[in-house]
Amino acid sequence: MLRVYIVFMWKAFLQRFTYRANSYFFILSSILRLSILASLWIALIGEGSVQDTTAADMMSFVLINMVVSALTRSSIGNKLAERFTDGSIAIDFIRPIRLKYYLIAEQLGENLYSTIFHIIPVVVVGLVFLDVQLPAAWWQTGMFALTLLLGIMLIYSINYLIGLLVFWMKTAFYTNWLLGALMELFAGSVVPLWFYPAGLYHIAMSLPFRFISFEPVSIFLGRTTWSESWTVVGFQLIWIAVLLLLEYMLWRKVQTKVIVQGG
């Protein structure tokens, strides 16, 4: 069965080649964004440091976050809502594959294409022209990869869970807007959480969003110790388990409450 989902992932990867012209514009816009953010942090921090953070640290933060953002991007909730709206969700209930895993495989294929052809060229430019710091210890790279993998699982679970709410709300607009706002504010992918005021910082620390990108990036930058990184892994696993339990409960209700629109 795993082979089936790998095929779906590969097809989604290949389908992105249809929009190759868009890749050039995306790369150019990403390089422009990188240069703007780099200039901004250099202007704000200068030659010194703010809260033990130098401009070089922020160059690394911005660059690695581009990679993480590409790998953790998820539109699973939107795709689930579209299937609900056009009625194709009814067919998914009788297909011999799990809808969730199909959507995940498709998303992985799209994200891999985006990372390889959109982000890697930008990373190369950043490594050449910016003062980027790479991990000083081998374990940082390994723990970064592990926490990033768990972060991908976490965002996919959150997005799929939010997508299931469409069966009650009949639209995904409001939930997706709310999720996007929470991610922007509390994920720590735009501004590091260590720069947050105390109130927002404590709220962010109590939510799962920081485990998607901020914590893996912090490990990559060496701001998290070996023992602290395992604490991060533990919390990621706990959040994933909680979300899977909620998903299981919601999915059982969905199976008895399918109201197809447009089909």
Image (tube, rainbow, N blue to C red):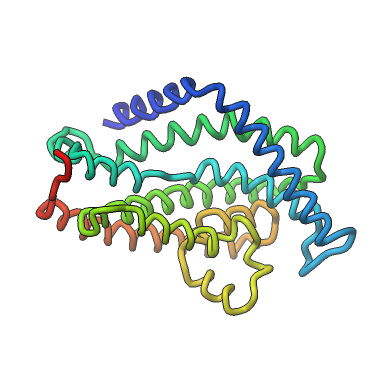
Residue positioned 18% across, 39% down in the render: 87
Q: Determine if residue 10 is in view.
A: yes
Residue that sits furthest to the bottom in the current view: 199
In the rendered image, the vertical position of residue 87 relative to residue 146, given as above or below: above
Give the tally of numbered discs: 0
Residue that sits furthest to the right in the current view: 47
Instruction: Specify whether 72 is left or right of 62.
Output: left
Q: Determine if residue 136 is in view.
A: no
Q: Position of residue 148 (x, y in %)?
A: 53, 48
Q: Quadrant of the C terminus?
A: top left
Residue positioned 49% across, 46% down in the render: 72
Q: Position of residue 200 (x, y in %)?
A: 57, 74
Instruction: Specify whether 176 is left or right of 226.
Output: left
Q: Position of residue 10 (x, y in %)?
A: 40, 25
Q: Quadrant of the N terminus?
A: top left
Q: Position of residue 255 (x, y in %)?
A: 13, 51
Taking depth in this image into account, of 239 and 197 the one nearest to the observer is 197
Residue that sits furthest to the left in the current view: 256
Taking depth in this image into account, of 30 and 204 the one nearest to the observer is 30
Hey, which quadrant is residue 218 in on the image? Answer: bottom right
Hey, which quadrant is residue 197 in on the image? Answer: bottom right
Residue positioned 63% across, 46% down in the render: 141
Residue positioned 62% across, 26% down in the render: 24
Instruction: Specify whether 42 is left or right of 155.
Output: right
In the rendered image, the vertical position of residue 207 relative to residue 233, given as above or below: below
